Image (spheres, rainbow, N blue to C red):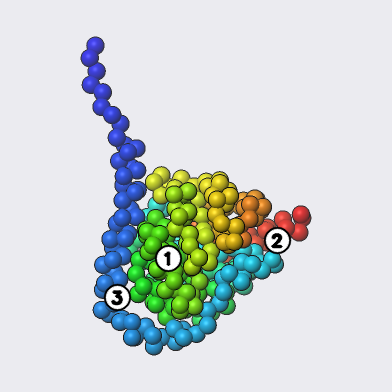
Amino acid sequence: MQTNCKPDTRNSNLETTQMNILDNIIASKKIEVKEKKKLVPVEELETFPHFHSNCNSLVSELLNETSTGIIAEFKRRSPSKGVINDHVQIGPVVEAYDTHGASGISILTDENFFGGSIDDIIYARNIVRVPILRKDFIIDEYQILEAKAIGASVILLIAACLTPERVRELALFAKRISLEVLLEIHNEDELKHICNEVDIVGVNNRDLKTFTVDINRSLELSELIPHEKIMISESGITNVNSILTLRQAGFKGFLIGENFMKEPDPAIAFADFVNQLTASVKGD
């Protein structure tokens, strides 16, 4: 009997689509930055109230032994999850993050793929005291100037989007205007992006090809990251035990967003999580 067997391309097609998401985001970002430079030139950014103000240090917060180490995120949606929470207002959420012990607040500013806005940081900066991380796909110095102008204290550089040389250039530019730099890596190959100008190294536990999440990615890479670098773990942290395990491996920070944002009231979810963490630490 003759069979007409064709290879199952569903998984490969899915992987190709997922890999292309990052390419699509970067292509969109290039257009966005080009347009922004025309609408709000650098000279205008330099007149923003926060451009010449001092930045709150995330590094100091993470090195504080009494801090939670949690960088709580405000994120409305993502390409992988779709809408996460588009009902809550940013004010009450970030205020609760600040009040209940966040070491920092991460705010997505990409509009096309994550539903964010620079207005979110401008608004949050006026009501919270903790450092704000501008989480976006930074490819141009203009975005760093914009981050300083809107009140961010930290920028994110994603190794998967940049060459090691470009990471160094952008990080040095950020340091010159007193911003701290978080470099996000996903695998061992991206360790070469780590440079002196980077303050914090974040391990994203989400595989960019399959979108699967595993905190073991952080545990494995922690042994290879230079010991003088502050380490944070990102994505997939859903319980206090994960934080305790990551702390033992040397991690000082834990970026958590979806775990709170998926709840009807992220403010309550965050407060409950911190209470659990505090109780666990006291229990030890």
Mark 3 belongs to which amino acid?
Answer: Lys
Q: Is residue 172 visible?
A: yes
Q: Quadrant of residue 82?
A: bottom left
Q: Earlier in the sequence, mark 1 or mark 3?
A: 3
Q: Position of residue 44 (x, y in %)?
A: 34, 86
Q: Residue at x 31, y 81 (%)?
A: 40
- Residue 278's tag is 2
Q: Earlier in the sequence, mark 1 or mark 2?
A: 1
Mark 1 belongs to which amino acid?
Answer: Arg
> In the depicted view, which residue is nearer to us: 198 or 27?
198
- Residue 36's tag is 3
Mark 2 belongs to which amino acid?
Answer: Thr
Kindly report which numbered mark, 1 or 2, lies closer to the viewer in this rendering. 1
Question: Element under label 1?
Answer: helix
Left of 84 or right of it: where is 267?
right
Left of 6 or right of it: where is 97?
right
> Number of numbered discs present?
3
Question: Element under label 2?
Answer: helix
Q: Residue at x 67, y 58 (%)?
A: 277
> In the depicted view, which residue is nearer to us: 118 or 248?
248
Query: Which of the image's four quarters has the N terminus?
Result: top left
| Labels 1 and 2 touching (C-beta < 8 A) | no
Q: Earlier in the sequence, mark 2 or mark 3?
A: 3
Q: Residue at x 32, y 60 (%)?
A: 26
Instruction: List the single residue furthest toward the right.
Output: 283
Q: Position of residue 242 (x, y in %)?
A: 62, 51
The residue where tag 1 is placed is: 168
Q: Tell me if mark 1 has few (under 14), some (14-19) or many (20+) residues whose alpha carbon lies within 10 angstroms of its own.
A: some
